[in-house]
Amino acid sequence: MRLFEIVQQGGPVMWPLLLCSLAVLTVIIERILFWISIEKNRNRALMDEILTLAENGNWNLIRQKTADCQDHIVQLLVTGIVHRDYDMGIAMEAEADHTVQRMNRYMPVLDTMITVTPLLGIFGTVLGIIGSFKILGTSGIADPKLVTSGIAQALITTATGLGIAIIAVIPYNYFNSRISRAIHAMEKYATSLEVVFNKSQTK
């Protein structure tokens, strides 16, 4: 059965479900590419080196080594170092919030689709069953195939809605786990930098 035939058989609710599936697919691809770029820019060795340099107060060398680095944790540490004479903690917190916002981008779309698509599917099924009862009311049970085929077609929307939600919930949970791990890593390095900086000030 071709896709167009399935959409036709499912009724008018299939069209918003089709748009929802396109939205889900677009967000998933965009987020995958985003996290790939995040991983490509990671520089764990430089993060540890920054802490060592900060302990010795080599601020200028840190700026030189981090000039072209796109690692979000490195940028977080550099932001704290730049504002070390004012309030390192607040500066890093603001930078971390900005990074988390980038990581959470389009996540509400996935969350909404997970909730809305099954409801749309049920709505389409209800409309289909209503149509089947109308046929039953006009033609009676002379041709029960018309009624059963109508109900079967109506269930297509429920299956479609559930399918979209299932497809969306797996990457949604994965992306959320990545965000949680990223937040934990930022907190870890930000705290380490503050500890190192306080030690350097007491020397």
Image (spheres, rainbow, N blue to C red):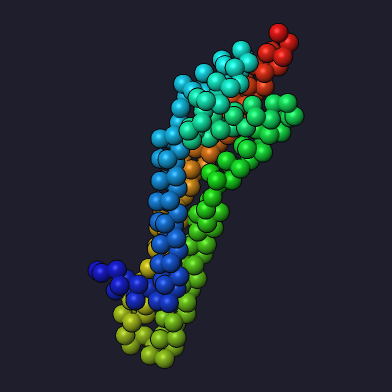
Total residue callouts = 0
Residue 128's image quarter? bottom left
Residue 58's image quarter? top right
Direction from residue 93 to residue 129 in the image, left or right: left
- List x then y, in percent, for residue 28: 42, 51
Q: Which residue is more in the foreground, 48 or 18?
A: 48
Q: Residue furthest left?
A: 1
**Which residue is painted at 65% across and 33% down in the image?**
92
- List x then y, in percent, for residue 155: 40, 68
**Which residue is painted at 73% across and 26% down in the image?**
85
Q: In this view of the protein, can residue 15 be seen by the observer?
A: yes
**Which residue is painted at 35% across and 72% down in the image?**
7
Q: Is residue 7 above or below residue 161?
A: below
Q: Is residue 5 above or below residue 84?
A: below
Which quadrant is the C terminus positioned in?
top right
Direction from residue 200 to residue 47 in the image, left or right: left
Q: Which residue is more in the foreground, 161 or 138?
A: 161
Direction from residue 2 to residue 153 in the image, left or right: right
**Which residue is painted at 46% across and 21% down in the image?**
45
Q: Residue furthest top?
A: 203
- List x then y, in percent, for residue 1: 24, 69
Direction from residue 202 to residue 161 in the image, left or right: left
Residue 93's image quarter? top right
Q: Which residue is more in the foreground, 65 or 72?
A: 65
- List x then y, in percent, for residue 65: 50, 24
Q: Which residue is more in the foreground, 191 or 60?
A: 60
Q: Is residue 170 above or below residue 195?
A: below
Q: In this view of the protein, can residue 154 be seen by the observer?
A: no
